[in-house]
Image (cartoon, helix red, strand yellow):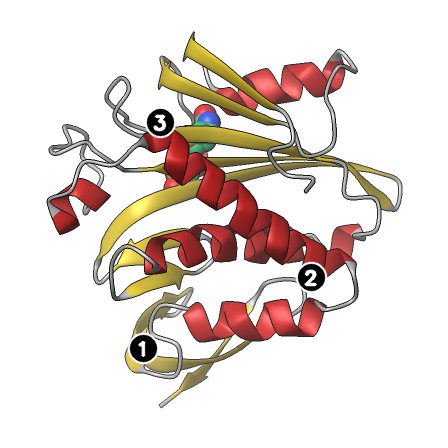
Amino acid sequence: MIIGAEIIQYENVSSTNSIANEMIKQRVAKNGSVVTAQWQDAGRGQKGNTWESEKGMNLLMSIILFPESIKPDRQFDLSKVISLGVFDTLTTKTSDVSIKWPNDIYVRRDKIAGILIENSITGSAISSSVAGIGLNVNQESFRSDAPNPVSLKMLTGTHYNINDILTEICTNIDRRYHLLITGHRRRVANDYRSALFRYGEWALYRDVKGVFTGRIEDISDSGLLAIKKR
Ligand code: BTN
């Protein structure tokens, strides 16, 4: 097992992604090492947003990878692997889990986990990758103006051991990553497509020209959605 072979657990950090990036810079990072924290005072989300998480309530983790065999034009494969590993873990605990493109994890219409992947590209290779995952586990109310956060506890009423979930996620991502690097990228792509929120359903989408009714038909290798307009 590569992912989670080494787990470095902190109490308070700025951001587990920042710590992981610093480890890479200092050349002390190992392939598959995982950094976790109970609390982040500058947790980072997508599009420059912050990531809200009450101390000790949720899973905050970053996986360090040196994905030598994955070319930069296929970097979205990493996104698929990470989202599927989180998806696999949650489907054993609750129903109606899906991946909202590109890599938010939803239960019905609410967001339970966010993923922030930071790849460094050198020439024609991904020299390193940090995959940050924030999974809402035991937190029961959210302050930020994020539209629709939800946690496992809010959905099931159960209190979870966060380290057990960490182990499950590492195992599931490791399995998916192994498939990817051993030539099974089509299988990973098919599973990702089947797990997509509203895959094959007519729904409202927005592009530069405005709102339209469409249906997700496919995902390109570079991760772009192909939406058929009605
Ligand atoms: C999103 O906006 O949906 C992505 C959120 C990613 C949050 C996680 S929490 C652990 C890791 N460290 C960070 O600073 N961000 C990611």
Q: Which residue is mark 2?
A: 179
- Whole-Å distance between the Cαs marked 1 and 3? 30 Å
**Discs 1, 3 touching: Cβ within 8 Å:** no
- Whole-Å distance between the Cαs marked 1 and 2? 36 Å
Q: Which residue is mark 1?
A: 212
On the rendered structure, is 124 left or right of 150?
A: right
Amino acid type, mark 3: Thr
- At horizontal 15% and vertical 32% (from top left) the residue drawn is 142
Q: Relative to residue 203, is residue 26 depicted above or below? A: above
**Residue 124 position within the rendered picture, expressed as x and y whole percent measured from the top left:** 88, 46
Give the image quarter of residue 212: bottom left
Give the number of the disc on residue 116. none
Amino acid type, mark 1: Phe
Q: Relative to residue 6, is residue 85 depicted above or below? A: below
**Discs 1, 2 touching: Cβ within 8 Å:** no
Q: Quadrant of the N terminus?
A: top right
**Residue 110 position within the rendered picture, expressed as x and y whole percent measured from the top left:** 22, 53
Q: Is residue 19 visible?
A: yes
**Which element carries disc 2, helix, strand or loop?**
helix
**Residue 223 position within the rendered picture, expressed as x and y whole percent measured from the top left:** 59, 62
Give the number of the disc on residue 50. 3
Q: Quadrant of the C terminus?
A: bottom left
Q: Is residue 150 visible?
A: no
